Amino acid sequence: MPIEQRGVDTIPDEERTSGPRDLVSILLGSNLCLGVIIFGWLPVSFGLGLWPAVTSVVAGTVVGTLLTAPLALVSLRTGTNLSTSSGAQFGVRGRLIGSVVGLLLSLGYTALTLWIGGDVIVGTLARLFGTSTDAPAVVVVYTLLAACTVFAAVYGYRLLLRLSRVLAVAMTVLLLLGLLAYSGDFTTAPPADTPYLLGGFWPTWLLSAVAAGLSGPIAFITLLGDYTRYISPRRHSSRTVLRATCLGLFLGLLIPQLFGTFTALAAGAATDYAGPLVDAAPAWYLLPLVLAASAGSVGNAGLMLYSMGLDLDAILPRATRARATLVVAAVATAFVFLGHFLWDARSAMTSFVLLLTALGTPWAVITLIGYVRCAGTYDAEALQVYNRRAKGGVYWFRAGWNLAATVSWTLGAAVGLAAVSTPLYEGPLLALTGGVDCSFVLSGAAGGLAYAALTLRGATAPAPDPSVASPEPARGRAST
């Protein structure tokens, strides 16, 4: 199987051979991993018992899926990734906002996946063989996981799709065995001496709904197009692709998160998840736990790293996808070491997902408004102007930036950051919301309403520019 040759250029229809089932396989198989499972631990670490944890995760996942899934239709129409597609709203240079947001999202989730997977592998190997758990052992395990992830990501979409198909079955079996393994210690109450993180039930429940439930689908706001750009709109309807996206996101995120809640309660995991998970595992489940931690981490982090490579490729058109992937892999690995040796897991995770949700939600809302307005009709060639180092086109706006969309996103992101409540930072607007984190709602509403108002009379509608000149072939740049 050859290495994928395409970066963010438009995928020709003859190469768009995937279908809705492949989309479900990717969203299900890649998410059945510890990097997603650990989000089910967050509600328990916040002080919630079984049913409050489950209801908050389910509610957040449903809301996030309904917001995020329609973004899959954008790349179905454009044949390129979502960050590049957002040039239709933000301008061919303004779409760099989406690339940066996507890069940060993927960077954080890649590091998190390798971080928790590596910690579980180190702890499990210590129980199995008495190996060391000190810094050198951690470095070796992290490095091996990162190397396997880089290999999968550099090879590209086809290898990741095959891996996801295998993981969808294998990880389901491993998780079912895990239910049996931890069932003897299961309890519905949170660990002792674990008070509500925000002091009261409903503020903590809402924090859980956003940080554990909503954050899962939001992580895919720039990723979905990486997969749907390989689906042909001539052979598969938008309705079918949307249903597949909703199903894949809902099951792919909810199943591992609920497994995380179950095991966190069984293991009494309060301030840490990896250590108690390994300690509470019966001896017969240690080997399956190593397999789940290693294979699942490579599958999930591989897809995230693949998306990071595309986003950096979009930011730096002269770079190739493979080279961009290697660069972001090095950065992600550095964050893994920082996470293990310097940061508190719960505080780092919660702060990261809440802050990135505040930045990403208004971008997603603006992109979806644009999709509805243009009825899914895009000029695929004009979207590639920046990648060809050219100027002009129907999405050129002003020097490649749509000021209305850029200002609207900036306003939404600022409102979201001012309304966020994390263990490391609290925004000034919390005094107006009773201390409840409403950053997701406020950022999306502020960004969307501002964009709708600024473009109400079509003042920002671009005029075709016949002066477009591309120094590269009309089809676009193919990168390795």
Image (tube, rainbow, N blue to C red):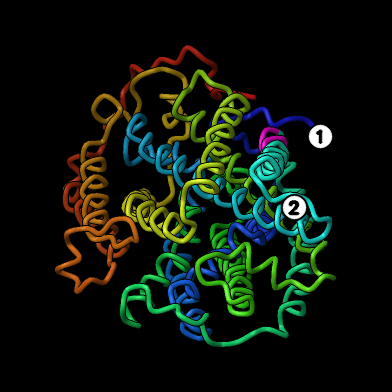
Q: Is residue 225 above or below residue 472?
A: below
Main SS category, magenta section: helix
Is residue 376 something one can see in this rendering? yes
* Residue tagged 2: 295
Q: Specify the quadrant of the image occupied by residue 461.
A: top left
Q: In this view, does 207 lie above or below 460?
A: below
120 left or right, relative to 246: right
Magenta span includes 193: no
Q: Which residue corresponds to the image point at 19% horizontal and 71% vertical from the top-left?
A: 433
Question: Mark 1, residues whose alpha carbon is within 10 Å: few (<14), some, or many (≥20)?
Answer: few
Query: Where does residue 84 sit, x and y in percent of width and height?
Result: 45, 36
443 left or right, relative to 25: left
Residues drawn in magenta = 150-154
Is residue 157 something one can see in this rendering? no
Q: In this view, does 431 lie above or below 231?
A: below
Secondary structure category for the residue under label 2: helix
